[in-house]
Amino acid sequence: MQISQAEFKCSSERISQVPKDDLRDIAFIGRSNVGKSSLINMLTNRAGLAKVSGTPGKTRLVNHFCIDRAWYLVDLPGYGYARTSKTQRGEFSKLITDYVLRCEKLHFLFVLVDIRLEPQKIDLRFIEMLGQNGVPFGIIFTKADKLSQTQARRSVERFRGALAEQWEEFPPMFVSSSAKGAGREEILAFIGQCLGG
């Protein structure tokens, strides 16, 4: 699948504000600073489409981007560490859980994981919640250019090992690098399959 048009549609503070049309959402989530915005910009080939920040917790709203007038790519707030007050952090998690568990537009969710890190409890907890609620999801390992291919393979295996404690079947997994464009074709092809096109 190729993307020829990508434009910002809206930001929502609560799920009652998300677009009311029948276009489906393909959403991206992960820990703060995992590289969501960079990945979205890489997938759409638009350098400034999603705002990239060095400060964790910058995305505080549900951001919808309309792709080829056919579906939405959705940038969700990061979970976990963010330089904000505890009450705000609580709101983020309510916004995230409301969207992920209650938004009927959500068609598929990609959980982004930093390939350089040991499996993080917060990622595993979030993935467990998705499984318990039957949310269809896949995992994208980001920042693969920071490791050698062997290190990257080991890191993915470590994560699979952590998942194997709770999961009999693994979700789809992709390895990406926004800096190098790695994983772009595979992820877009998978989204195309998800949307049935």
Image: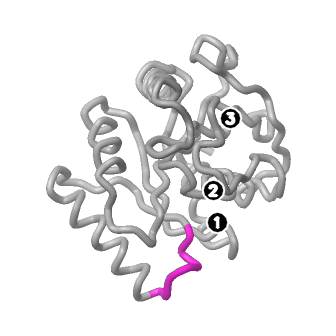
Left or right: residue 25 compared with residue 94: right
Q: Secondary structure at mark 1?
A: helix
Q: Position of residue 3 (x, y in %)?
A: 77, 52
Q: Gap between marks 2 and 3, in whole Å?
A: 13 Å
Residue 188's tag is: 2
Assess whether residue 145 is covered by the magenta stretch. yes
Q: Position of residue 106 (x, y in %)?
A: 52, 29
Q: Quadrant of the C terminus?
A: top right
Residue position for label 1: 185
Residue 72's tag is: 3
User: On screen, 116 above or below 69?
Assistant: below
Type of the residue with mark 3:
Tyr
Left or right: residue 165 compared with residue 181: left
Q: Gap between marks 2 and 1, in whole Å?
A: 5 Å
Q: Position of residue 105 (x, y in %)?
A: 56, 24
Are the residues tagged 2 and 1 within 8 Å (C-beta)?
yes
Left or right: residue 5 compared with residue 143: right
**Range drawn in magenta:** 143-149
Residue drawn at point x = 85 percent, y = 45 percent? 5
Q: Secondary structure at mark 3?
A: strand
Residue drawn at point x = 67 percent, y = 57 percent? 54
